[in-house]
Amino acid sequence: MRISGLAARLVLSPTVLVTVVCFYGCAVWTAYISFTKSSFIPNYTFNGLAQYERLFATPRWGVAYTNMFIFGVLLVVGALAVGLLLAIMIDRNVRGEGFFRTVMLYPLSMSFIVTGLAWQWVLSPSIGVQHFVRDLGFPNFTFDWIAQQDRAIYTLVFAGVWHQAGLIMAIMLAGLRGVDRDIWRATKVEGIPTWRVYLGIVLPMLRPLVVTCVVLLSVAVVKSYDLVVAMTGGGPGFASDLPGKFVVDFSFERANIGQASAAAVVMLGSVFAALAPYFYVELRKRGQ
Amino acid sequence: MSAVQVRGLRKSYGPLDVLRNIDLEVREGEFTVLLGPSGCGKSTLLSAIAGLDPVNAGRIEIGGVDVTDLDPSARGIAMVFQSYALYPTMTVRNNMTFGLRVKRLPKAEIDKRLTWAADMLQLTALLDRKPAQLSGGQRQRVAIGRALVQQSRVFLFDEPLSNLDAKLRAEMRVEIKRLHRELAPTVVYVTHDQIEAMTLATRIAVMRGGQIEQYATPDELYERPQTLFVAGFVGSPAMNFLPVVLRRNGGAVAAELGPVTIPLDAYAFATPPADGTQAIFGIRPEHAALSGAGVQVATETLFMEPMGADTLGWFQLGTEKLSARLAPQTARGISGPQRLALDIANASIFARDTEQRL
């Protein structure tokens, strides 16, 4: 008993060590750096909130920070909606279920880099959809969101939803398959229309799965760096910048570790602030 | 007037015939039980009546209207399922009223029906609970309540008690019987439990292999089973079956079981059998006694099976075993050769080839 307990501790200790040092340790170190005078190299002179004041005075940060919320909300809602609709479609016993399931899950097997490049080409005005439709004989057709300052961020949402919807579909489909067949039969005898069954009975039953999906999608939002880099490079200008890219750019290209740390801490705080109330409500409900 | 009428119903899954030419008539206010072993087609028949599964041929009428091609909700039925099929995220109140609200019934009417059904089933205190907070019996009552508020003419029950433990099952049986007495709805009820069938039904349809073997009152079914299968399926402990050859001697018929001859003068044959007919002689354990009138046969005591109220005594008759239902006091200390008195008037005799009653 003692030996096996010891063995378990030994086996687990590297993981625990890595978690404590690399995740929590680095997070604490980053937070500390953000309150110092650091710029190119770490400088441990305490400097109050100066880094934050400067950060929020930077226009590029303002854009990136707002974009995170636009991108986040639209991606979570969009991927959930599309994934769910796909799952319901498949659950309605379409022919060739296996084929569609694979097709829809396929985007997930590609990295965000590939996704971003592919969508960059598809949406590029000179070679993508716009070019194609114009060649079909509609010379005035215009679809150049990716090149517009105020639209570029939505093209990232397209690509993100395309990439993530398959995963949501797979999770939701598993949930739909778990619904007791007799429940469907009971609603048929009662004459409840199919859409009311989904909205009123089936979706509420899938609530725990929705929570899981929201977590997975939120993680995708926060860590989305590669998608931006590959697809828009944060442009035009820095119109489609996201905090992740901002932090990496400032740490390595601009060599301003103080600004990067402050941005990272704001990002972490925002994620907590956005998700905490949701999890509080959901987890309390399940506890009951 | 018949509430449910099924004619020439056929259903098959590919080469497998699940229902073969089913005819069934359920009268207004009748409690019909579809009884049979697993895979006999009883649940399929119920689904067909409900309209949940398409059929290959035949006609279904409910309340005199041809509903063969109608949706389940247009058939004027309510249904209770084996798994209860409650909506897990809704309270009991919403479970019972969701269908009515979807149909946009006036709120006053919904409340009236809910109060009535909750009162009927003692659910009033539970209305704001979720299904997960209820016991199995309570869940089944909610499922019945959800069927009641629809105020349909016909109720369909698909093995509603088989997920409950034995004690709850007995309680719910009484509950369902009371509901039927008070509301007198037409009921079609599927079960594989013969005790449920015997206690609840006004008529029982025993099914096997997609066909109805016999459709009769519980008494008729028990006392005069039409086929060997019905005789063996209904009744516990089971009926004794002895392979015999029928011998005619003038007007008198006797059964030959090896060296033993059982005169059958008291048995009412539908048609007098030919001499030498291969037959099965069936007699229930309670119609074999240690004393009294009836045909006497010589047996050897084998062993006793005490069952509480009765003891089942096993005796060797020629080459066969025969059980008799005995009073526990009588059964104690019995051994050696015994004479058993068989009540031939209550016996059942079947042809060995057709398995039909003779």
Image: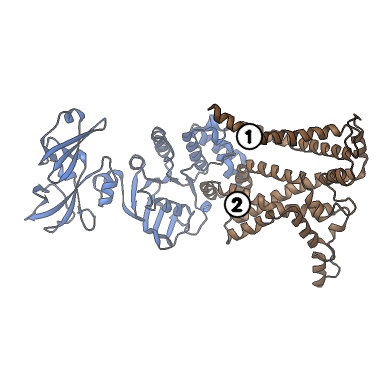
The image quadrant that residue B334 belongs to is: top left
Residue A82 visible in rendering: no
Amino acid at circle 2: Thr
Q: Is residue B292 above or below residue A130?
A: above
Q: Find numbered disc 1 in the image and state the secondary structure of the residue it sits on.
A: helix
Q: Chain of mark 2?
A: A
The chain displayed brown equals A
Q: Position of residue B348 (x, y in %)?
A: 20, 48
In percent of width and height, residue A288 lies at 61, 31
**Residue A194 marker:** 2
Across and down, in percent, residue A53 comes to 92, 35
Q: Who comes first in sequence, dot 2 or dot 1? A: 1
Q: Position of residue A4 (x, y in %)?
A: 55, 31
Residue A41 tag number = none
Residue density around tag 2, few if under 14, some if 14–19, many if 20 or more, within 10 Å: few
* Rendered view: B38 above or below A270: below
In the picture shown, does residue A282 fall above or below B26?
Answer: above
Q: Residue at x 42, y 46 (%)?
A: B186
Q: Residue at x 46, y 43 (%)?
A: B82
Looking at the picture, do discs 2 and 1 lie on one chain? yes
Q: Chain of mark 1?
A: A
- Residue denoted by label 1: A12
In depth, the one of A92 and A283 nearer the eye is: A283
Q: Amino acid at mark 1?
A: Leu
A56 left or right of B53 in image: right
- The image quadrant that residue B218 belongs to is top left
Residue in the foreground of this view, choosing between A100 and A2: A2
Q: Colour of chain B?
A: blue
Q: Nearer the viewer, residue B125 or B349?
A: B349
| Cα distance between the residues tagged 2 and 1 | 49 Å
**How many badges with numbers are in the image?**
2
